Image (cartoon, rainbow, N blue to C red):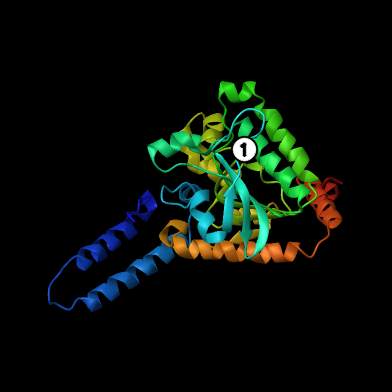
Amino acid sequence: MNLNYLDFEQPIADLEGKIQALENVKNEIDISKEMKSLKSKSNALTKKIFSSLSDWQISQLARHPNRLYTLDYIDSVFDEFIELHGDRTYADDCAIVGGVAKLAGTPVMFIGQQKGRSTQDKIKYNFGMPKPEGYRKALRLMKMAEKFSLPIITFIDTPGAYPGIGAEERGQSEAIARNLFEMSTLKTSIISVVIGEGGSGGALAIGVADRMMMFKYSIYSVISPEGCASILYKDSEKADIAAESLKLTSIHLQKEGLIDVVIDEPLGGVHRDQNNAKTLLKKALVKELESIKQLSVDELVKNRTEKILNFGRFEYDHFA
């Protein structure tokens, strides 16, 4: 796999370029010591850089072109996945992928947002921006899961819901609001994972969950750093400042109680060791699914409702 390097990863790219050049040398000279030294330096440099990433750098990692998307995980994390299509009202939105599957032998309903890698796929999946029919398809599958007592697992990875005229005419805001309303009292367990980019209501529409999980270098926010900078500072180039203010990283969100579990990533991010990332995700999902199985449906709904109502609550004693 040919890796793309972000600006702050350039020193790592230079070292790995030297390693690659040595690997391509075919002669009888023993270069094992040089290779070992360079790889050691590369690992040490990667650890150093990734130990002090800014919120803006993490935002860039969340959108990394080599980062795994929803469909990249399915075959490794789930078994016997059968995709289901359509909202039974208007159309089938490819930006929302869903269907029945098994996770470590347990039947589940899976729903995820899919971006595209090639130009053709980006158009097919609408750059990961679901339309109203996508959210209605997701809700149809959730209702099916409720009927058959299937746990629901959702993967969040979107810059936001599609803001086009057609989407608004077909009730984009209503579709999102309906999902929030229905998911809050859905009589089955829900686990959501932010695998990359969690943008605004477009992410939240499949993210009302009993367990909210997030990869270490993913982001979850009401607006993108660029959008925030354009509004507040009238300059999208100040996205780095906006990212710090938005507190959109896993560390900040877990501290605020909005995220329950942070899933660690391989050194350098998901894209640097994709197989390990898939293993880490599956392990985390199985652990949370086993934990959540111990709760009754009434307990799940009660806890989920209380969790939602506690978001944004002030401690009025501070103003006394």
Horizontal and vertical percent position of residue 69: 49, 49
Which of the 4 image quadrants contains residue 294?
bottom right
Answer left or right for 311 relative to 213.
right
Binning the other alpha carbons within 10 Å of mark 1 as few (below 14), some (14 to 19) or many (20 upward) gives: many
Instruction: From the viewer's side, name the closer residue of 60 and 110.
Output: 110
Name above or below for residue 68 compared with residue 293: above
Horizontal and vertical percent position of residue 70: 53, 49
Instruction: From the viewer's side, name the closer residue of 257 and 277.
Output: 277
Quadrant in which the N terminus is drawn? bottom left
Answer left or right for 231 relative to 261.
left
Instruction: From the viewer's side, name the closer residue of 251 and 67.
Output: 67
Residue at the location (80% across, 49% down)? 187
Residue at the location (68% across, 63% down)? 288
Residue at the location (17% across, 79% down)? 30
Residue 175 visible somewhere in the drawing? yes
Answer left or right for 87 relative to 224.
right
Horizontal and vertical percent position of residue 315: 82, 49
The residue to which callout 1 is attached is 202
The amino acid type of the residue labelled 1 equals Gly
Horizontal and vertical percent position of residue 203: 62, 42
